[in-house]
Each structure stands twice: as C-alpha cells, then as structure tokens.
Image (cartoon, rainbow, N blue to C red):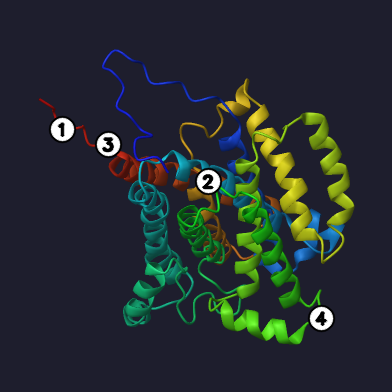
C-alpha cells in the first residue's frame, strides 16, 4: 500500500463523485433471501420449501446468499485495503464496520430474544462471562434453554458467518504484507487449494490422511465452512485483482448463469461453481447497473448488515408469540421489522462508528 495514497485535496477541489452501482441493492436482496430461506426451516425444520434447495438438493437460498455476500465482500475489501493509507487505517475501518453493530445485536438477542425464548434472568446473568467471550470472538450468543423444543433452538443462527468474514479481513492483511497482491496469481491458487480442502472434509475427495491434517491445521469451529467461505471470499478478491482483464458484460453473465444452474446440482461442484460463475453474475449486476432506481436502493443508507443480524432473532420472537403464524406473514413481518432495526442500526451505530474511525488527521503545518 502507498503511504501517500490519500492526499488532502486543495480547499477549492471538490471530492470526486463515487460511481453509481447496484452493490447496496444486491446486498439487501441477499439479506432478504436469507430470511426467505431461514423462516420455513425455523418453523418446522424442513429445508425442502426453500426453492433453490428443492431445485438443486445441494444449496439453499440462504447458502447462496451468504456466498454472494462473501464474493462481493472479497471484491470490495481488496479495494479497501489497497486504497487505505496504512494497515492501521484499514483495520480500524474493518473493526468499525463489524464490531459495534454486532455487539448491539448480540445485546438485543440476550436482553430481548432470550427472555422471550424462555431463559430466566438468572441464567442470563450466569452466562455473562461466556457471552462476553463469544462476543469478542464474533460468535453469536448462546444460552442453554433458549427456545428449547423448537427447531433450530438458537438465539441467532445467522451470526456464525461474521467471525469467518472478519478472519477474511485479517487474511487480506497477511496477503498484502507478503506481496500476494503483486503476484496476483497466488490468490486464485490459494482459493483452489481451499476449495480442495473443503472437498476433502466433505468427503467428495477420499483422502483420510489429508482430512485429519486439515482438521488439525484449521483449529476453528466448522473448519469446512472456514475453508469454503474463505475460498469464496478469495474468488471475489481475484475478480478485483484481475479487473483490468475481466470484462463484466451482461451477455457473458447470462451465459455464466446458464452454465451455473446444472452445476448447482453437483455436490462437489456447487460451491466453487457458484463462487466463480455466480460471483461473475453478481458483480456484473453490481458494477454494470449505473443508472436508475437500483443504484439508489440501499445505497446511502445500507441496512443490509442490520437486516442480516436481526432477522433470525426477530423470527424466533414472532413464532414464540404466535407459533401457528402463517409462513408468508412470518416472512413479511420478519423482513419489515428487520429492515426497521437495520435502519436504526445504520443511523445510530454503523454510520457513526464508520465516521469516527474514518476521520483523517489534518497534516501538520509546514514552515
């Protein structure tokens, strides 16, 4: 990174306008698809009502949405890293983007969702040390007895991806420091190796010795998910690093989508195919749509992170209050309430935290 990349413009210079795109719109769509996928399963534990899972048998809308988030994030975070003046500035922005909203959403889960889910305040008090440790490591809150007897008895079953996301942010620093972005072929190579490791853990590649070594070498909860999501993230990073050679064209995106659909029915190919082909489709939409309403939806007020954080506990609360709530109504109410909480989260927490951590110090006056 260039220590002098961000120079203070002259007082009369207007800041360059950021190009319009549909990134915000896509992020909100992906968060909405997670709701559509999760609510039916929370109601009765049956994933077959997820239309994508019904079609492919390998991947639901929720899994596809999470992979979509990671592809887009890999692209944007690589750009953020290379555009920041220092590693410290980059890390401060990443912490500000993830931690404050995550901590407040965790607090909501503990003081609102958990009591409604049948947890006593005494049990919550006893769990405080564990809850604090989990929050530090970006793991969602878990309290014994919450929503006992329900399908997916978790206070927040969506938060597990956030720790993986933040680890990807740290991986970007490592890759930047060792020069992987200069030798950019190393990034897709690493993605291929991670996909292969995930295939070994999933049993698609029979190699017991390698499986045991991978489990030992990836000491995190859900090593298969760690490898898979990191690989998907690096595919997005690869798209950014090769942006000078990759043409994002709508007709190519249509062709990529046509090739992708049958690959999703193959368990061993679904994840890498979605990352590569689906990632190309998503980034083409995000970058090529530069006019019209899609460039304004969720652009200046990005509620997608908040929607993702709050949708699960809101659905658990709704079903605890009305267990027989119709599916369509539950999805609609969950989306509406999660959007409202996401709006509050953006304006009161996320936006302010990003503003504080993004302030630039004025240069010292010279003689």
Q: Residue at x 53, y 35 (%)?
A: 298
Q: Which mark is residue 364?
A: 1
Nearer to us: label 1 or label 4 = 1
Which label is found at residue 360? 3
C-alpha gap between disc 3 and disc 4? 52 Å
Place of residue 117 in the rendered image (x, y in percent of width and height, measured from the top left)? 49, 71
Badge 4 element: loop
Q: Is residue 151 visible?
A: no
Eyeballing the image, is 55 above or below 3?
Answer: below
CA distance separating discs 1 and 4:
61 Å
Mark 3–mark 1 Cα distance, whole angstroms, equals: 12 Å
Report x, y in % for residue 192. Answer: 71, 61
Q: Earlier in the sequence, mark 1 or mark 4?
A: 4
In three-dimensional space, the C-alpha distance between marks 1 and 2, rounded to whole angstroms, equals 30 Å
Q: Is 367 or 275 nearer to us in this picture?
A: 367
Residue 308 showing in the rendered view:
yes
Q: Is residue 204 left or right of residue 353?
A: right
Foreground: 341 or 360? Answer: 360
Q: Determine which residue is flagged by label 4.
A: 206
Q: Are marks 1 and 4 in contact (CB under 8 Å)?
A: no
For residue 40, which quarter of the picture?
bottom right
Q: Nearer the viewer, mark 1 or mark 2?
A: 1
Is residue 97 shown above or below 319? above
Residue 26 image-quadrant placement? top right
Secondary element at tag 1: loop
Quadrant that contains the C terminus: top left
Image coords of residue 88 (percent x, y): 33, 51
């Amino acid at each position: 990174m260039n220590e002098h990349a961000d120079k203070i413009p002259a007082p009369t210079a207007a800041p360059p306008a950021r190009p319009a795109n549909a990134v915000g719109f896509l992020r909100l769509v992906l968060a909405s698809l997670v709701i559509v996928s999760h609510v039916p399963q929370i109601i009765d534990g049956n994933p077959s009502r997820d239309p994508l899972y019904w079609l492919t048998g390998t991947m639901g809308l929720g899994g596809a949405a999470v992979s979509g988030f990671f592809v887009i994030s890999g692209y944007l975070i690589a750009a953020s890293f290379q555009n920041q003046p220092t590693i410290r500035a980059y890390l401060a922005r990443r912490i500000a983007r993830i931690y404050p909203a995550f901590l407040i959403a965790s607090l909501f889960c503990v003081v609102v969702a958990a009591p409604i889910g049948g947890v006593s305040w005494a049990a919550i008090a006893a769990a405080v040390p564990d809850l604090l440790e989990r929050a530090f490591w970006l793991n969602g809150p878990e309290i014994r007895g919450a929503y006992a007897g329900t399908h997916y008895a978790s206070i927040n079953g969506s938060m597990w991806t956030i720790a993986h996301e933040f680890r990807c942010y740290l991986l970007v620093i490592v890759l930047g420091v060792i020069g992987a972005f200069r030798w950019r072929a190393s990034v897709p190579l690493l993605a291929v190796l991670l996909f292969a490791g995930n295939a070994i853990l999933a049993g698609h590649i029979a190699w017991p010795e390698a499986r045991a070594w991978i489990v030992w070498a990836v000491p995190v909860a859900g090593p298969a998910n760690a490898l898979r999501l990191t690989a998907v993230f690096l595919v997005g990073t690869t798209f950014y690093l090769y942006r000078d050679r990759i043409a994002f064209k709508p007709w190519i995106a249509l062709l990529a989508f046509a090739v992708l659909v049958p690959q999703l029915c193959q368990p061993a190919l679904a994840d890498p195919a979605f990352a590569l082909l689906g990632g190309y489709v998503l980034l083409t939409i995000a970058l090529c749509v530069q006019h019209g309403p899609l460039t304004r939806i969720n652009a200046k007020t990005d509620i997608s992170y908040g929607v993702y954080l709050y949708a699960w506990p809101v659905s658990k609360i709704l079903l605890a209050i009305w267990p027989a709530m119709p599916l369509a109504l539950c999805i609609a109410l969950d989306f509406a309430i999660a959007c409202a909480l996401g709006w509050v989260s953006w304006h009161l927490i996320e936006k302010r935290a990003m503003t504080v951590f993004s302030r630039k110090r004025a240069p010292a006056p010279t003689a």
